Amino acid sequence: MSDEKQHASGDVEAGDTSKRVGMEAIRERGVDPEELREKLIDAVGAEFTTYYYYTNLRMHLAGHEDYKEITEDARLEDRAHFELVAPRIYELGGHLPNDIRDFADRASCPDAELPVPMGGDEPDHVEDLDAESILEVLLEAERCAIRTWSEVCDMTQGKDPRTYDMAQRILQEEVEHEAWFIELLSMERDGEINPAGHFIRGEPGDAPYSTNRRINDSA
Ligand code: ZN
Ligand code: FE
């Protein structure tokens, strides 16, 4: 008899699609699923806008082919972070904003815009742009991402294993991204050797920890 099975029923009525046991289970453990999902929307808003802005930053690193390659890895991995977490928002009863302008506005990190020189012209008037100032934008964007995903880890650790698993995967890559840009900026700006400890990905934007595919594949 199914009644005798410990987890066969609970507070959500059988067949009720207006509630989610996946939300109630984390609420019982002390996470507010509505608050969490709104924070996740802000966080993936930052991943998505960073992916967009890094496209433009990378374009403007002409002549620094090594910097372009590393920025490309960071760019594609931020897109992977968006894609990893987007389904989680729906599982928590939320949805992506219909208007991309709303989505960009609520992103939890600043826009990683081209650093237009003081007194400079429009961003497409860029002859005064240098690699140093672009690397500073990249570095601070990574730091904002580390702070964001660290907060999500803190909110979910021991309470929401699924979100925690995603956030810690992303955090691993964001910490690597920071190390890459510290290394590049240290040499470019200060002539200092400040090793990242690791090299660029084998495939562009490999996302070794965070791709959806790798979660589902054991290969
Ligand atoms: Zn990211
Ligand atoms: Fe990143």
Image: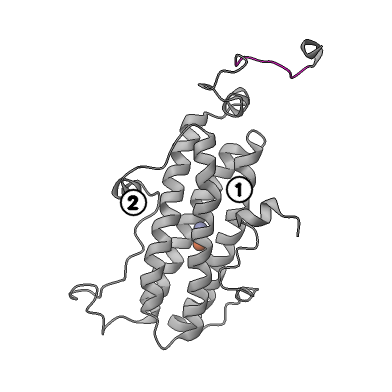
Q: Quadrant of residue 116?
A: bottom left
Q: Is residue 42 left or right of residue 171?
A: left
Residue 103 position, x and y percent, is: 35, 47
Residues 71 and 217: in front is: 217
Which corner quadrant holds the C terminus?
Answer: bottom right
Q: Which residue is mark 2?
A: 104
Residue 30 position, x and y percent, is: 59, 26
Residue 30 numbered tag: none
Q: Residues within 10 Å of mark 1 (few under 14, many from 20)?
A: many
The part of the chain drawn in magenta is 6-12
Q: Quadrant of residue 114?
A: bottom left
Q: Is 67 located above or below residue 152 in the figure?
A: below
Counting residues from the N terminus, which is met first, the one under dot 1 or under dot 2? 2
Residue at screen point 43% across, 68% down: 138
Residues 15 and 52: in front is: 15
Q: Amino acid at mark 2?
A: Ala
Q: Does mark 1 have its CB less than 8 Å from ligand 1? A: no
Residue at screen point 59% across, 65% down: 176
Residue at screen point 19% across, 73% down: 122
Q: Secondary structure at mark 2?
A: helix
Q: How far is the residue under mark 1 from the one under mark 2? A: 21 Å
Q: Secondary structure at mark 1?
A: helix
Q: Is residue 106 left or right of residue 172?
A: left
Residue 49 position, x and y percent, is: 38, 57
Which corner quadrant holds the N terminus?
Answer: top right
Residue at screen point 48% across, 43% down: 40
Residue 88 position, x and y percent, is: 54, 41
Predominant secondary structure, magenta span: loop
Q: Does mark 2 have its CB less than 8 Å from ligand 1? A: no
Task: Decide whether residue 97 is among the magenta residues.
Answer: no
